[in-house]
Amino acid sequence: PLAAIGEDAVPDVDVGIVVVGASWGGLQALSDLLDGLPASFDLPVVIVQHRGKDAESLLAMLLQDHTRMRVMEVEDKQPSVEGTLFSLSVDEQVRFSRPSIDVTFDSAASACGSRAIGVVLTGANEDGARGLRRIVDAGGRAIVQDPATAEVRTMPMAALRSVPEAERLTVRQIGPRLGQIAGEKAAAAAAARSSKLKLHRGSESSGTQARP
């Protein structure tokens, strides 16, 4: 059910993907979130927005107005691409919701573990709460829209009951926070690679000096 997931497809940083779930009131919340992402943000993002079975596939087009990232409808088993935002197509109902946020979050937790960030926004049911718990239990991060700022509080409140340690932010704070997390993790990964390279070079130098 999830595109942009896979060991070889996830970018080489500690946090490899962002998965966002939204329902009632989600279009405005998603637009505000994307408006707040830094222009340099390049992690793949998967958007799960509940919609009717017969709804026209306009979400990708509507979201494109709010981001420099390339927005596209997801296709099954599609590899992730840095700097790309994927919108899930209508899927079979799970717990009366389509597409299912829980199923998508479960996939992210299984495939990415600590490299996943789950975000739950406004909505009128509890989809996403269980999946967000799975992401955190796998070592990933959780961000939930402050229910007081949500058009419908049910979904973020359920997510906070399931993951009380999640960061609670207004939707306009979430974009900058995602940029901050991605930047910190990318810097840490670069430092780790640099350290490994120095150790490797030091080992090679010691080996050369030890030769008769």
Image (cartoon, rainbow, N blue to C red):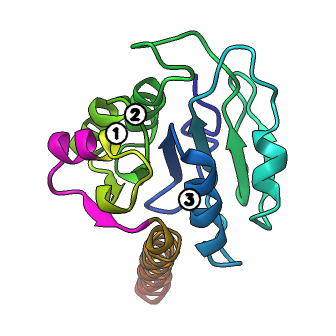
- What separation in Å lies between label 1 and label 3 (alpha carbons)? 32 Å
Describe the element under mark 3 as helix, strand or loop: loop
Reading the image, the residue beneath label 3 is 12
Give percent across and percent down for residue 96: 44, 13
Q: Residues within 10 Å of mark 3 (few under 14, many from 20)?
A: few
CB under 8 Å between discs 1 and 2? yes
Q: Residues within 10 Å of mark 1 (few under 14, many from 20)?
A: many
Query: What residue is rendered at 45% in x and 59% in y?
Result: 15
- What separation in Å lies between label 3 and label 2 (alpha carbons)? 36 Å
The image quadrant of residue 68 is: bottom right
Reading the image, the residue beneath label 1 is 155
What range of the chain is rendered magenta? 157-170
Give percent across and percent down for residue 52: 65, 20
Of all residues, the one furthest to the front in this rendering is 151
Give percent across and percent down for residue 147: 31, 55
The answer to whether residue 2 is above or below residue 120 is above
Q: Which comes sooner in the sequence, label 1 or label 2?
A: 2
Q: Nearer the viewer, mark 1 or mark 2?
A: 2
The image quadrant of residue 192 is: bottom left
Q: Amino acid at mark 2?
A: Ala
Query: What residue is rendered at 45% in x and 74% in y?
Result: 173
The answer to whether residue 186 is above or below residue 136 is below
Whether residue 138 is visible to the viewer of this picture, yes or no, is no
Q: Amino acid at mark 1?
A: Met
Describe the element under mark 2 as helix, strand or loop: loop
CB under 8 Å between discs 1 and 3? no
Q: Amino acid at mark 3?
A: Asp
Reading the image, the residue beneath label 2 is 124
Q: Is residue 50 left or right of residue 35?
A: left
